[in-house]
Image (tube, grey):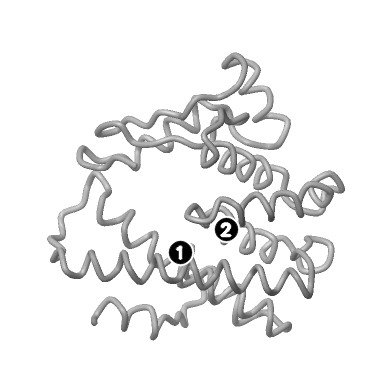
Amino acid sequence: QAAVTEFSSLSYDGGYAISPWQAWLIQRDQAEDPVVACLFALVAQEQYGRLWFSALYSSDQTVDVAQPEVQVMARVTSALDVRNREWLRETVTTRGWFRISEYGEYADAAAWLIVQHADLDVEFQREMRALLDPIAAEGDMRASSYAMLTDRVAVNSGEPQRYGSQGRCVGRGQWDAFPYTGTFEEMDARRESVGLEHHAAYVSRMSERCSADRQY
């Protein structure tokens, strides 16, 4: 019950965000378009849930969390993903994508997060990626986001990725990328072409999030 209450009462009154979910709430409060404000609110809740789990499984976690609360948070976060996915599917049907030129970079990023985390509906991810093909070609969405979604769809479809952005923790302080096409140098060059950091730096950053008992 406490976990559910956290989501339902999520708010932030500070002037400076120290966490992504807080930043999305600030964007919500600044949005003039109610649909865009709703988008930011949905993503703020989803990010709160994911960051809760990231903190729980971080290598320096010291707080003992009861297993029932973990289970409730998992169910609620999963339900938020489903809700967000269906909301976005319906919204882009009537409005189209949240293009940078029309809605700004934050709206594009928020909509992308919903698609990126819709792993239980790969068909939806494929559908959205097909929608984004011409938009990305026009430069009206962030190239790095499109690249990471391309990898996500590939991995969720059992295929090798192109940019090495998807992987898992395999031990404490160790993150490995799933298989990718071509050589390491070719993959790293593709990353550079879309504004992603070099893969060695990316692996180092992702590895910092891996605790001894976290594998995903």
Q: Position of residue 26 (x, y in %)?
A: 56, 75
* Residue annotated with mark 2: 113
- Relative placement, left or right, of 211 versus 7 is left
Q: Nearer the viewer, residue 40 or 80?
A: 80
Q: Nearer the viewer, residue 21 or 14?
A: 21
Task: Residue at 68%, 66% (x, y): give it.
Answer: 107
Answer above or below: position of 157 versus 71: above
The type of residue carrying mark 2 is Leu
* Extreme-right residue of the structure: 138
Residues marked 2 and 1 touching at CB (< 8 Å): yes
- Relative placement, left or right, of 132 versus 8 is right
Q: Nearer the viewer, residue 97 or 17?
A: 97
Numbered disc total: 2
Answer above or below: position of 14 versus 214: below
Residue neighbourhood size for the residue with mark 1, other residues' Cα within 10 Å, grouped as few (<14), some (14–19), many (≥20): many
Q: Secondary structure at mark 1?
A: helix
Answer above or below: position of 66 versus 127: below
Q: Position of residue 51 (x, y in %)?
A: 38, 60
Residue neighbourhood size for the residue with mark 2, other residues' Cα within 10 Å, grouped as few (<14), some (14–19), many (≥20): some
Q: Quick one: quadrant of the N terminus?
A: bottom left
Answer above or below: position of 105 versus 181: below
* Residue annotated with mark 1: 47
Task: Residue at 26%, 42% (x, y): give it.
Answer: 214
Task: Residue at 71%, 36% (x, y): give it.
Answer: 194
Q: Secondary structure at mark 2?
A: helix
Q: Position of residue 159 (x, y in %)?
A: 56, 31
